[in-house]
């Protein structure tokens, strides 16, 4: 997939036509990924680019607002004073404005498309605990069961707490452990018993099953959505146990 530089808007030539071509080429690449039901990393990149563009636009508006204005007319009929901006954009700033105004609606369009895909696949992924779940939920195992492939993949997970500028939020890291064919001897319960027996690091682990009955690209879609669904599931389960909701 073709990438869009973090500072693409000012990188190399600040020219509207050049940036338009560059941007449309990027969106074409994103669209190809989405058509293959591959949601990540394009979806995250789209959101990050959109946030940076919005921030840049807001900063530009704030800068204009801070510059002094010149009184040019006293409108007695409408009882108002009319001012003229004294801040004049240079040609490069005008080009950047054109690029931003063209780009933002495009990013919004593809983000909406990504949200639709995310919601569709999220509805087809079911999260459930495997056996009795312990009180400690920050570490454990996540089973990815794809019925279309008749297989189960085991990932070790660890939930971490991040502090943003305004709020705290939970993230999750996973590490691939093993792969099993779905057979009578490889039920979720049997796989759990094997993990407890051979992986003494977690003697009483929390284990969750993420299951889907439709074909979903694992690395680009199934695993990322299952991870976020697991964070939500565990957060709700933790709150219920603590009696906070």
Image (cartoon, grey):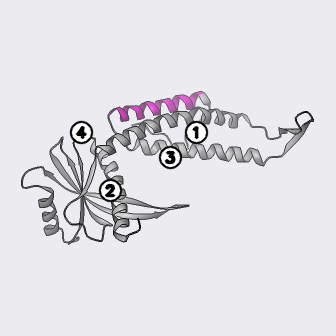
Q: Residue furthest left?
A: 184
How far apart are the two marked residues, 2 and 3, measured between alpha carbons?
23 Å
Residue drawn at the location 12% of the way across and 49% of the way down: 181
Front position in the image: 1 or 61: 61
Q: Earlier in the sequence, mark 1 or mark 3?
A: 1
**Alpha carbon separation for disc pair 2 and 1:** 36 Å
Identify residue for label 4.
215
Q: Earlier in the sequence, mark 2 or mark 4?
A: 4
Q: Residue at x 88, y 41 (%)?
A: 70
Q: Name the side, left or right, on which 143 lies relative to 158.
A: left
Look at the numbered disc 3 and give the secondary structure of its residue.
helix
Instruction: State the CA–CA distance, disc 1 to disc 3.
Output: 14 Å
Label disc, if present, on residue 186 of the rendered structure: none
Q: Which residue is mark 3?
A: 48
Is residue 11 left or right of 110 when viewed as pictured? right
Q: Which residue is mark 1?
A: 9
Q: What residue do we see at 58% from left, 37% from top?
A: 12
- Mark linked to residue 230: 2
């Amino acid at each position: 997939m073709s990438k869009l530089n973090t500072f693409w808007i000012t990188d190399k030539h600040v020219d509207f036509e050049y940036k338009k071509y560059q941007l449309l080429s990027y969106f074409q690449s994103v669209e190809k990924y989405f058509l293959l039901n591959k949601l990540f990393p394009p979806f995250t990149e789209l959101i990050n680019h959109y946030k940076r563009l919005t921030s840049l636009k807001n900063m530009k508006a704030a800068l204009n607002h801070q510059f002094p204005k010149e009184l040019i007319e006293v409108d007695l009929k409408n009882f108002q004073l009319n001012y003229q901006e004294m801040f004049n954009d240079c040609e490069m700033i005008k080009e950047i404005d054109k690029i931003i105004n063209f780009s933002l609606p495009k990013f919004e369009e593809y983000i909406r498309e990504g949200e639709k895909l995310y919601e569709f696949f999220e509805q087809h992924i079911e999260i459930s605990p495997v056996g009795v779940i312990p009180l400690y939920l920050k570490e454990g195992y996540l089973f990815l069961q794809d019925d279309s492939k008749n297989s189960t993949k085991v990932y070790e997970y660890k939930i971490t707490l991040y502090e943003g500028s305004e709020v705290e939020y939970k993230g999750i890291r996973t590490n691939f452990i093993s792969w099993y064919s779905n057979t009578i001897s490889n039920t979720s319960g049997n796989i759990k018993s094997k993990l407890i027996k051979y992986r003494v690091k977690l003697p009483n682990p929390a284990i969750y099953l993420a299951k889907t009955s439709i074909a979903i690209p694992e690395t680009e879609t199934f695993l990322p959505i299952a991870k976020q669904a697991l964070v939500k599931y565990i957060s709700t389960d933790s709150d219920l146990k603590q009696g906070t909701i």
